[in-house]
Amino acid sequence: MTESNNVKASEVSSASTSTNSRIATADQLHEQQLAQGPLLEVKDLQVDFTSDTGKAIHAVTDSSFSVYPGQWVAIVGESGSGKSTSAMACLGLLPGTGHVVGGSIKLDGEEISGWKPKEFVKIRGSKMGLVPQDPMSNLNPVWRIGTQVKESLVANNMDVSHEKRSKLSKALADTSVQLKDEGDETFIGSKELPQLLEAAEKALVETGCEGAKLEKAMADFRTDWVAGSETRWRVADDLMRYGVKDDDAWYIAKKYVTGSTMEDRIAGLLSEAGLPDAATRARQFPHEFSGGMRQRALIAIGLACRPELLIADEPTSALDVTVQKKILDHLRMLTDSLGTAVLFITHDLGLAAERAQHIVVMYKGRVVESGPSLEVLQHPQHPYTKRLVAAAPSLASQRIVSVKEHGGDASAIMEHKVDTAKLEANDTIIDVEHLTKEFKLPRRKELFKAVDDVSFKLKRGTTLAIVGESGSGKSTVANMCLKLLEPTSGKVLYDGQDIANFKGKSLLDFRRHVQPVFQNPYGSLDPMYSIFRSIEEPLHIHGIGDKKSRAARVRELLDMVELPESVMGRYPNELSGGQRQRIAIARAMALNPDVIVCDEAVSALDVLVQDQVLQLLNDLQAERGLSYLFITHDLAVVRQIADDVVVMQHGKLVEHGTTDQVFNNPQKQYTRDLLDAIPGGKLELGVDLADKK
Amino acid sequence: MGKYLLRRILQMIPVVLGTTLLVYALVFALPGDPVKAMFGDKPVNEAVAAQIRAEYNLDKPFIIQYLLFLKNALTLNFGETFSGQPVISEIARAFPVTIKLALMAFCFEAIFGVVFGAISGLKKGKWYDSVILIVSLLLISVPTFVTGFVGQYVLGVQLRIFPVTAGSNPGFFDLLMPAMVLGSVSMAYIIRLSRSEISTNIPQDYVRTARAKGMSNTSVTFRHILRNSMIPVVTYLGQDLGALMGGAMVTEQIFNIHGVGYLTYQSILKGEANMVVSIVTLLTLVFVVCNLVVDMLYAALDPRIRYA
């Protein structure tokens, strides 16, 4: 395993210096990290689960990695690779029958792998925090958000009126800032806050500060001085920066910053995690929060007791890219200023490379590669890592850009070339005109406009991608194009005919030519139907051929999606997610459609599988001249498949252009935000990656 | 919330009207003439019989009888029994006994049901979990009158721990065994309900999150596992309280407790329409109110549920 001292010091510091100038320099940080030794050291870890029949299932067979204080380490791998299991073993929170059977886990040099549940209670929360994966299921629905934050503070006997600093940040403070006593770390209380602001204004006026400068200073103070989050020395520091004399600044800080209450601290923690209006929000229940807000609450809980290590298990996988970016930026800033180390678990290599200094790649229960992020990305050694680097959509689109910047021919590495000839041809297969859909919301008078005046044309033989965040109305558009929903106004033309007029036989005919593939391959196949029956069903419904010719067609279709004939007799639960999605595609293809509507068809799949399915779709399009309406939230995937892109936000069409136009020259701020949010977007991969394929 | 409550209270009116009409019709349709029955073995004096019929409105058509009953009931005049006692005083005598019995049975099933259910659910697979499961299955499958007679014979006649019957004005100790018999089936259901709820809550993500906060096993168990598991249990208990208030016809017969169930049974035998309908009206009200309380409790326990 590569030692962590390879970490590029410049990377570590880049975020900390930019977000928090009060933290020491990168060299000092690096020095301290090494001096303190690894915070968490996992060696040859083995974890088994016991099956119902008593057999041992090896979930993790060989996992080794270390995390140094203040460092971000990412574990990357596909689902089932043992990355979460390795991390949960460190917390003593293995699910079900899971247990550690070999290897060692050392926290601060102390062996913890053999600990009893009671012993783990002591380190959880206070030394090791957790930010779990799914924000929907990780908050107890019956307790208020604030109460759930409070539980963490109470369980660890936290002093709610003083900040707790990690060893690392204390050590760093020793060298750069003058030593601070306990009192300097006292939090602002919400009761004293108005008086503090008043005193600050007075002091500023006394120093001769006035007009716009005074207003700016006060505005800064109002946003920065959060009760239960900002401490005395920062108040003094802020005052001094605006020209208040040292003694006066400290006098004010000492007089008015006298510690926060439990409620202040809860609100302070929540607002630190980026939750607006935290004091009110703390009194709400989880179901009143959006996914992103819940994730922020979970981050607040994870960091509440200032752990030295935070285990973040896919903390943003369930969220939209732009929200993901905001939350991770915020988490980065927080952990940097607190000196918290983060063990970051993700399936997205691009994300890992962008966020972590060190990457650990896991495959089938083993660590197959580990090293500094850029090193792993630019010179992957293990074949699996090479495949992962090649397949990651975020990196793929980045690759295209970087090749172009270096003056190379990007089309060589693009899986999908924009077909300008077809786009310019006047051969429209689906024409959406001023489509609007309104829904009635319960207990609201005004109608909710899910889709607001959207128009676009899908040209025959091309792919049009509709991109947007959840709630942007993209799936509603798809459902209206499939005639599964009636538009409130506007129309959808298929081959020049208004689909609203299709009834009976003509509707059946339309259904035959326009087929859907849905997001969840687990939900879209009937679990009681064999694979053969699932694929044969559309042929049967449309009365095509006899038994024998239908069976032959099913074989042909399975061959087309590159699955063996032997799967015909099996049932969906016996297949993997990627295989099921292939079945769903085969079923959609059964009737030789002209158009396939893919509603987040690859979002639920692991990168490698996703890559295969996208290639399959590309190949099918080239062979059969299919047209795809491709709905996705992932702009990175768009680059790999689409010719034309429609960007939607809040039901409205924001931008419409060819893929090249949208990626190279985005016109709207929202599109630029989406592009910026693609993880790994800012990585400099260099041209040498072109040969990695 | 206030609007919702008002709507629910207004909904009670058709419910109560419907049940009384139904029960009145059922008693009316019972075979046999209650007036003839009053004469017993003696020959029926037609003149006297006609007079009694007129006095109790029995000579009028069914719908008129019902409307007359309603009119009187609105003025809280429930009429008299055939033996001349005011119906209201008979009910007033029986209800306190039943309330006492019902509350005792309720406490018994709630406490033991939840405790055993929690032990069983938290320690799944242990020997005592199996024992609790088998006993609860036994209690569910054996009818109350068997449990009642076995209890009466073993604890009352053989061991002489509890009195065999309760009598007309029973105290706490007299009602202890009947309450346990009455609550046993529901207790068994609560054990099974709590057990399954707890075992579905244990692997929940938010329980893991709570552990990751560093909370002790005890507080995780109480605040996250048990708290969430109790939502359906409380709902079941609330509805069961309504049912228990209806009087336990079988249990009260076995232990000779002069409660509502006993009174209802006797009145049905005698064809006392007034009495039966009055009791049922009251019970319907009790049941509907209990249901409303359960729904309110449900909203209080689960913040995701809000009525409007």
Image (cartoon, coloured by chain):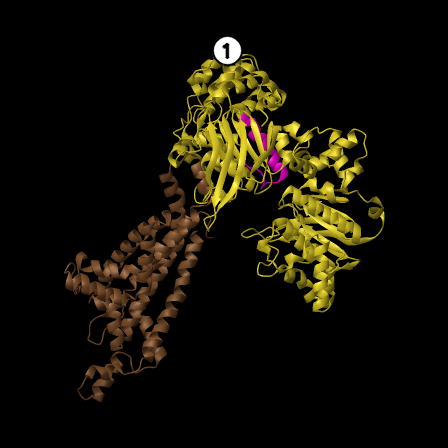
Chain colours: A yellow, B brown
The quadrant holding residue B243 is bottom left
The quadrant holding residue A566 is bottom right
Q: Which residues are magenta?
A: A313-335
- Measured from the top left, where is residue A418 in percent x and y? 80, 43
Numbered disc 1: what chain?
A
Q: Is residue A149 above or below residue B20?
A: above
Q: Is residue B32 above or below residue B221?
A: below
Residue A202 seen by the camera: no
Q: Could you tell me the amino acid type at mark 1?
A: Asp
Residue beneath label 1, please?
A246
Q: Residue at x 20, y 72 (%)?
A: B85
Q: Is residue A537 above or below residue A168?
A: below
- Measured from the top left, where is residue A642 in percent x and y? 75, 44
Tally of numbered discs: 1
- Measured from the top left, where is residue A195 in percent x and y? 46, 22
* Left or right of residue A206: residue A408: right
* Left or right of residue A577: residue A685: right
Determine whether the residue tagged by mark 1 lies in a helix, strand or loop.
Answer: helix
Query: For residue A402: magenta?
Result: no
Q: Is residue A655 above or below residue B154?
A: above
* Left or right of residue A439: residue A55: left
Residue B29 seen by the camera: yes
Assign the magenta stretch its main secondary structure: helix
Q: Nearer the viewer, residue B156 or A686?
A: A686
Q: Residues within 10 Å of mark 1 (few under 14, many from 20)?
A: few
Query: For residue A322: magenta?
Result: yes
Q: Nearer the viewer, residue B229 or A213?
A: B229
- Measured from the top left, where is residue A316 in percent x and y? 58, 38
